[in-house]
Image (cartoon, rainbow, N blue to C red):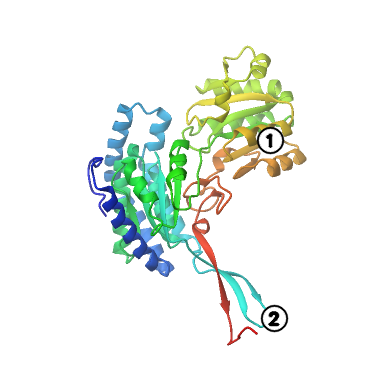
Amino acid sequence: MGTTATSIPSAGADHAATIDAMVRKARAAARLLATCPTTTKNAALRAMARSFRDHADEIKSENARDLAAGRDAGLTPAMLDRLELNDKRIEAMAAALETVAGLEDPVGEINDVRVRPCRVRIGQMRVPIGVIGIIYESRPNVTADAGCLCLKSGNAVILRGGKEAFHSNTVIARLMDAAARETGLPDGSIQLVPTTDRAAVGELLRRNDCVDLIIPRGGKSLIEMVVENSTIPVIKHYDGNCFIYVDRAADPAMAREIILNAKCQRPGVCNAVESLLFHVDAAERIGGEVLRKLLAQGVEIRADESLRRLLPDLELKPAADADWETEYLDLIVTAGVVGSAREAIDFINIHGSHHTDAIITDDYATGMVFLRAVDSACVFINCSTRFSDGGEFGMGCEIGISTDKLHARGPMGLKELTTLKFVAFGEGQVRT
């Protein structure tokens, strides 16, 4: 597979030749995977899970190299947390593979069958997309999640992770590739680009002759680069500038627990809350207690003038305009005051990233207006934004959270990695 190197290959490598070999191998594998029996795919996923457990020490050893490099590079604690693979997280990766193996295989499903007047039956069959390229940053568990979901949905996948997780990604992909081939899947089903040089990404993005879809998952600069340079269709997974709006009818205890969970449980992930809006009536009644709890957890709060005026005794830093559109991935939150739920909705639609947003309210009508009007992939009432996750949605795991409206939106699991074709069943009919 070409991913057994122990150091990051130099920028002088022949990336065009490397990518050419990979995409051709992936295209050949995709043709076979499209009709691969579900039992074979499930056996491969379970073999991968066993391999993760059997090689946990090797995975942690390679991950330690990435963590050491990350500390030397000055990564924040939250970013290092995203990068770390410990026993619990390796077990979670293995368990996710087994969960996906237990899910219904969408490939080959025929739905919406209609009998036409000529007695021809016409329906839609769910089929793999083909070859998928996934370009991502930071979290090495994405290698396992993306690889297993693409495989179960009958797609060949080319993975390109970020330099901060190169050694972790390499060992995970190698173990998955070996297990896939040992259980009878074609060579090239799962491949990892063996360099972090962006020149290799450029080569991949031009190969629309062999690659059917590109999914970038990372910061804005990465996604914008992919969109600008790709000749292949792209499903974007933009950053998670997630908002929570605390309505005038919010329960104080509920607001406190949800916000603390959404910000502090794991601040370096895309579904952590980054911005808080309080209805003016809730700002003093609820805001003071919530913000004090956040400050006690070491959270830096950047507040608008109205909130700082309402809560002068708290250590609130002035919020800049750019803060409202920032994904911190750290123990920082922006907070402000609005006059109504409609003002909160409009503000979120303008400044949010259309990822995941939530309202805390005991008013059913206000909650339903928020649910319908906020233009995001995931919109919640009275629960943490941290539930925006394929595993929590029952998908086993996810490719990421699509912020596009076509072809998939929200967490991308098995069905989102397939497409549809029309099929017809006749008995000799001809058109007259």
Q: Position of residue 112 (x, y in %)?
A: 63, 69
Q: Which amino acid, mark 2?
A: Pro
The quadrant of the picture occupied by the N terminus is bottom left
Residue at x-position 51% and y-position 25% = 332
Instruction: Tell me the quarter of the picture where residue 27 sits.
Output: bottom left
Q: Would you call the spot at circle 2 few (<14 residues within 10 Å), some (14-19), or many (20 or more)?
A: few
In the rendered picture of this protein, how many numbered marks are placed on residues? 2
Can you tell which mark lies on residue 63? none
Q: Position of residue 319 (x, y in %)?
A: 58, 20
Q: In screen coordinates, is 406 left or right of 199?
A: right
Secondary structure found at label 1: helix
Can residue 166 be seen from the camera position used here?
yes
Residue at mark 1 to residue at mark 2: CA–CA distance: 48 Å
Q: Would you call the spot at circle 1 few (<14 residues within 10 Å), some (14-19), or many (20 or more)?
A: many
Of 235 and 308, nearer the camera is 235
Residue named by callout 2: 117
Instruction: Tell me the quarter of the picture where residue 49 sits.
Output: bottom left
Q: Which amino acid, mark 1?
A: Ile
Mark closest to the chain's N terminus, 1 or 2: 2
Of 156 and 278, nearer the camera is 156
Q: In screen coordinates, is 338 left or right of 192?
A: right
Can you tell which mark lies on residue 345? 1
Residue at x-position 66% and y-position 36% = 359
Can residue 95 be seen from the camera position used here?
no
Q: Position of residue 104 (x, y in %)?
A: 51, 63
Secondary structure found at label 2: loop
- Mark 1 or mark 2: which is in front? 2
Q: Position of residue 291 (x, y in %)?
A: 60, 22
